[in-house]
Amino acid sequence: MPVISFANSKGGSGKTTSALVLACELAHSKPVTIIDADPRHPVTTWAKLPNKPENLTVITNQSEKTILDEIEQAAARDPFVIVDLEGTASRLTSYAISQSDLVIVPMKEQQQDAMAAIDIIAEIHRDMKAVRRDIPYAVLFTQSKVVAKSRTARFVAKQFRDNPRIETFQTEIHERDAFAALYAAGGGVRDLNPKEVNNLPSAIENVSAFAAEVIERLRANQANQAEVA
Ligand SMILES: Nc1ncnc2c1ncn2[C@@H]1O[C@H](COP(=O)(O)OP(=O)(O)O)[C@@H](O)[C@H]1O
Ligand SMILES: [Mg+2]
C-alpha cells in the first residue's frame, strides 16, 4: 500500500539507484511495484536484464496524464509502490509527490545537489498545501564515501543534518561498485557475484539498513497520522 517516491530534479543524485536497491530488497519479502517515471526509462531497461525479482512488477509510466491511475492501481494491488521520478521538476513529479506516503530526496554531498534538494523540498511543501495534508519526506545522502569524506561533503551533510526542519536518513547509500554493477548485471545487490564485485557484503548490509529505516519511517508516520486523526 505505501507509496514511496524518489525525487530530486538534479540528474545523477542517485534516485534510480536508491529506488532500485530498495525495490529489490523489499521484494524479498513482499510484492513491490516500481513505476518508472523517468522518460529515459532506466528501470525499464534494467528490468530486461536477468535476475529481476519475481515479486517485483515494473510499470513504465506513459505520461503525466496516467501517473495518478498507475499509482492508484499499483497501491491497490501491492504492499509497496516505489516511484522513480525524472530529473526535472514537473507536473508529473507533483502528482506523484501528492500521492506519496514518503518522499525520499536522494542527494550527493555536493553543493549543486544540495540546492536541487532544497528546491524539491520547497516543491513538496507546495504540494502539501495543494492537497492539504502532510507529506512526509526525508533527505538521503547517496554516493557518499565510506572513508575520508571531503571537507565539502562533511559541510554539506552537516547543513542538512543540523537543520531541525529537514528530516535526514541516518543511513547513507555509499559509493560502491555493487551499486553501479546493477545496471550491467541486473537484479539487486543480493544477486551479484561476490567474486566479481568488491566488498559485496558491505553493500548488502547498506541496503538492508536502508530498507529497515524506510519501514521504520513509514510506521512512525502512520502512528503520527493516527494520533492526529
Ligand atoms: N551508491 C552508488 N555507488 C556507485 N555508483 C552509483 C551510486 N549511485 C549512483 N551511482 C551511479 O551514478 C549514476 C547516476 O545515478 P542514478 O541513480 O541514475 O541517479 P538519478 O536517477 O538521480 O539520475 C548511475 O550511473 C549509477 O551507476
Ligand atoms: Mg534516474
Image: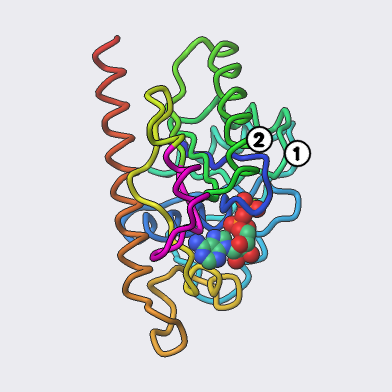
Q: Nearer the viewer, residue 2 or 190?
A: 190
Q: Quadrant of the C terminus?
A: top left
* Image side of residue 87 versus residue 135, left or right: right
Q: Secondary structure at mark 1?
A: loop
Magenta-span inclusion, residue 85: no
Q: Secondary structure at mark 2?
A: helix
Give the label on residue 25, or none.
none
Residue at x 38% of width, y 68% of height: 203
Kindly tell me whether residue 170 is visible in this rendering.
yes
State the scheme by which the image is colored. Answer: rainbow
User: Which residues, given as a range, are shown in magenta?
Assistant: 140-158
Residue at x 38% of width, y 76% of height: 200
Residue linked to disc 1: 63
Q: Nearer the viewer, residue 76 or 148?
A: 148
- Where residue 19 appears, as percent x and y from the top left, is 51, 52
Residue at x 34% of width, y 61% of height: 206
Work out whether 163 lies above or below 203.
above
Residue 16 sits in which quadrant?
A: bottom right
Q: Are marks 1 and 2 in contact (CB under 8 Å)?
A: yes
Residue linked to disc 2: 67
Q: Point out the residue furthest to the bottom here.
A: 195
Q: Nearer the viewer, residue 224 or 33?
A: 224
Residue 191 sits in which quadrant?
A: bottom left
